[in-house]
Structures are given as structure tokens and as C-alpha cells.
Image (cartoon, helix red, strand yellow):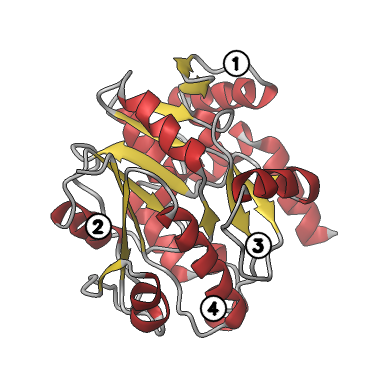
Amino acid sequence: MPLLTIFSAPKPFTDPHIATIQRNAIRSWLHLPDVDVILLGEEPGLADDAARELGVTHYPEVVRNANGTPLISSMFALARQHSDSPLLCIVNADILLMSDFVEAAKQVVAQRERFVMLGRRWDLDVTEPLDFSGDWESLLREQARRDGNLHKPAGSDYFVFPRACYTDIPDFAIGRAGWDNWMIYKARAEKWAVIDATHDVMIVHQNHDYSHLPGGRPHYDMPETDENVRMAGGSAVTRYTIIDANRQLRDGKILRPRPTRGRFLRGIEQFLRKLLFFLPEAMLEKIVRPQRWIKKVKKIFG
């Protein structure tokens, strides 16, 4: 029985660049020890170009919303149904993982019973198939540090958790904003450890455009994102990011997060939200996040 089952719902393999970076990601997962990989959905090219070619377990029967977008709730249910590993991990299909990822999962599960492990990504331009021979991990790490950028805490591209956690997922649409923020909020509300593993784990996001989405627009502007936010519980919930982690993994030990300006300001925001809960959301937003509101006004009026 493997320690960890990774599951993901890739985008269609019709765009050559998307197909390349997704194959790169999946191949990196298959190189991990003590891991099973499950691909979900019936996007064009998934069965033939990825699952069959790479020898990955594939289940097409994911429940979709009215727009045909796979639902997170169905993905979680299928991953539980078709795996027996103690840990599960949902990850975006453009993310490269390395052996430190599994090592961190082992260290965390040895120290906590209920948790979610997540971390910031390194953004890197990748346009060609990767060579996974030799010491490919060291070469990738060097390239990411040299040519890539560490993403801000607002992005969450993977979640590792015990299979007993997250058994009541709303019907979020995958690939749209909001659901990942809810994952952090839910863990904090349930008093699980939310563990930022950025220090110990390097994950690499292969940059891409949004041509796979209607109109080529970022998913933040889509109605499905609005619906995700509604199901999550509103914008106050979808403010939760990696900065809300209440633990950090540093050199294999789970510690309290180090103080930063961002965490300090986030603490003030959360305090004001609780204190002024009776105000309308629009007014509350101007009070607790004034700089963000000022930027919006400047953008509108120049």
C-alpha cells in the first residue's frame, strides 16, 4: 500500500504547450517513491495521450456542472473510492513534484493526525519535454532558482491530507478560484494543522496562458468562480491563503510560523472582520483592506 495517492483532472491535451507541460508534470509524479497516481476526467487526449501512453490509472466518470467543468467533490470521492493509501493529494496538472515532496509528507504524518500540507510554488517557463534521466531534480531546482520566481502566498496548487479529512466537499468547479481558499478555511475551522511546507518542499509551476478557457480570460472573471465563492461562504472565506497557515514545516519539524508583515496585517484584518461582522461586505472590505480598495478606485478613474 503506497503512502500517498496523487489525483488530478488535467486540461485537454489539444494545445501542444499544455499537453507538453502536463506530460512533464505527470512524469515527475510517476518518479516519486511510495506514490500512486490517478487521472480523472474525459478531456480530449487524456485517455490516449496521457493515461495509456504513461501507464497511469484513469477514471473518466467525473461528475460535471452545467458548463461541463469537473466537480471537486466528485474528484475527492473517486480518489477515496479507488485508493487505499493513508494520505491523499490533489494537485494541479502543471505542477512538477520532486522527492522532497514525499519526504515532507512522511514527516508531517508522523507528527500530526489531522492536517493539510500545502506550499508556495516556483513559476518557471517550460516549453519542451523534460529529461528525467540522471540528476534531473538538482538541475530543475537550479533552473527554478535561476530563472523562476517564487509565487505569492495567494496561490495554492496542492493539498496533502489524511483520507479522513475533507469528506464533505461542496460542488466546486475545478480550475476556478475560491475552492482552494475554502480548503484552508475549512482546516482552520476544524482546528487541523495548516502546514506551510514551502521551506522544505520545492514545487515548480510550468507557466501557461489561459487559451484553454472561454475567451482566453483568467478564471477569476468567470461566473463559475463567482459560484465557487458563493458555495465557499463568501469573500471573507476566499481571503484565506497560505499566509493563514498556522504551522510551518522547517527541516522536518512542524513549528509555529515566523512573524512577517503579511501575517501581521492579515491578523489585523481577521480581527476587524470579527469585530465589524454586522457591516455590509462592501463597506467591510473598504475598512479591512483599504489599500486594495484604493488601487481599484485608481484603476477605474486613472
**Crowding near the residue tagged with mark 2, few <14, some 14–19, many ≥20 C-alpha atoms within 10 Å:** many
- Select label 2 or label 3 by which is in front: 3
Return the disc, 2 or 1, that comes first in the chain's sequence: 2
Q: In this figure, which residue is indicated by the disc labeled 4?
A: 212
Residue 154 in view (yes/no): yes
- Select label 3 or label 4 by which is in front: 3
Question: Residue 29's spot in the image, x, y percent?
Answer: 44, 54
Q: Quadrant of the N terminus?
A: top left
Return the disc, 3 or 4, that comes first in the chain's sequence: 3
Q: Amino acid at mark 4?
A: His
Q: Do the residues under discs 3 and 1 have CB atoms within 8 angstroms?
A: no
- Name the residue located 46 percent from the left edge and 57 percent from the top edge: 92
Q: Nearer the viewer, residue 184 or 79?
A: 79
Q: Do the residues under discs 4 and 1 have CB atoms within 8 angstroms?
A: no
Q: Is residue 152 left or right of residue 109?
A: right
Question: Residue 286's spot in the image, x, y percent?
Answer: 62, 39
Return the disc, 2 or 4, that comes first in the chain's sequence: 2
Q: Do the residues under discs 2 and 3 have CB atoms within 8 angstroms?
A: no
Q: In this figure, which residue is indicated by the disc labeled 2?
A: 73
Marks 2 and 3, how far apart in space?
26 Å
Q: In this figure, which residue is indicated by the disc labeled 3?
A: 207
Marks 2 and 1, how far apart in space?
33 Å
Q: Residue furthest right?
A: 302
The image's mark for residue 96 is none
Q: Amino acid at mark 3?
A: Asn
Return the disc, 4 or 1, that comes first in the chain's sequence: 4
